[in-house]
Amino acid sequence: MALKDLVHAQTGYNYAFLDEGSKKEIRRKLLKAVALPGYQVPFGSREMPIGRGWGTGGLQITLALLGTGDRVKVIDQGTDASVNAVNIRRLIERTTPDVTTTLKTADATIIQTRHRIPEERLRADQTLVFQVPLPEPLRLVERQESQTRLMHASKNYSRMWVALYEEIVQHGQIARSSNYPVLVGGRYIMAPSPIPRWDIEKLNNSDHLSLFGAGREKRLYAVPPYTSVVPLAFEDYPFAIENFHGVHCMRCGSDSSYLDEIVADNGQKIFLCSDTAYCDERVANQQAAGNTGV
Ligand SMILES: [Zn+2]
């Protein structure tokens, strides 16, 4: 028997995998999330054909939104080629025949992402969907859900501020490198999912809609366009992004993108763009310019 004989066309699945009632509920909860920026809305997270913790929250949002003519891009840590991104893209392709997938950021109407925001500024007609492992930013200072909900309801964030103060006392700075807590619309403290600090600015006053889904924790939340997203910081210990001064991408030469540090075979450290589609496009443009002698 050959392996390809075991692969059949997917039949018997609903459009976009989820049943219509589930998708409708997710869309209703998303509307509530958009109306209350940064507020975590509980939702009935469904069983998905991937494990919880592998992006089921983001995937459910994406599937609930998809319709004829949509173009979907899926990235994982900035790359379209990781196993997780490839499998999610394949599931979307198999269950939504009138939706196309793309690797180009500018071509996509919906971008599902894990741990990064694309380098290109997203437009008003694009939606960014985040896969979120831990939606509750206060979990590190309070274990009980009933208490964190009370703290959000009364905007009582003093313990969060004390935790940040203690980080400065211990480390001389606010040490967390990703999932940096932000204040959304001047009201709710929100976990931006484990994106690097570099990406926080792209959420602030953006043209695009950002949606966040945590499947295991059964929460979704949103940052609508043109909403303030401010990282928590003290006046004398301001928020700072990762520092890439003096280094650039080995492949495309970019010195203005978020770079991954990689140790080469000879032990030397090199840097590459984390956003591989951005890097590919820069390389293609440079080659085109070279070919035409520009
Ligand atoms: Zn590059």
Image (cartoon, grey):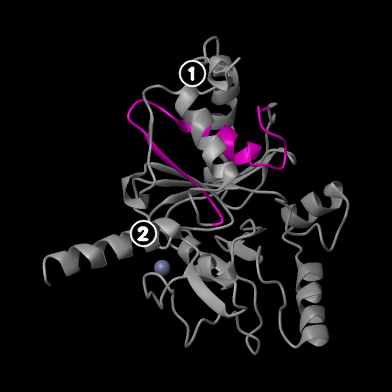
Q: Earlier in the sequence, mark 2 or mark 1?
A: 1
Point 72% across, 60% down: residue: 155
The amino acid on which the numbered mark 1 sits, given as a three-letter code, is Tyr
Asked if the stretch drawn in magenta spans residue 55, the answer is yes
Q: Position of residue 45 (x, y in %)?
A: 69, 31
Instruction: Judge left or right: residue 266 versus residue 152.
Output: left
- The 10 Å Cα crowd at callout 2, few under 14, some 14 to 19, many 20 or more, is some
Q: Position of residue 248 (x, y in %)?
A: 44, 79
The amino acid on which the numbered mark 2 sits, given as a three-letter code, is Asp
Compared with 25, 160 (above or below) is below
Query: Is residue 18 among the parts visible in the rendering?
Result: no
Q: Position of residue 6 (x, y in %)?
A: 58, 16
Residue at the extreme top: 12
Residue where numbered disc 1 is placed: 15
Residue where numbered disc 2 is placed: 280
Point 77% across, 59% down: residue: 138
User: What segment is highlighted magenta in the picture?
Assistant: 48-77
Asked if the stretch drawn in magenta spans residue 212, the answer is no
Compared with 292, 67 (above or below) is above
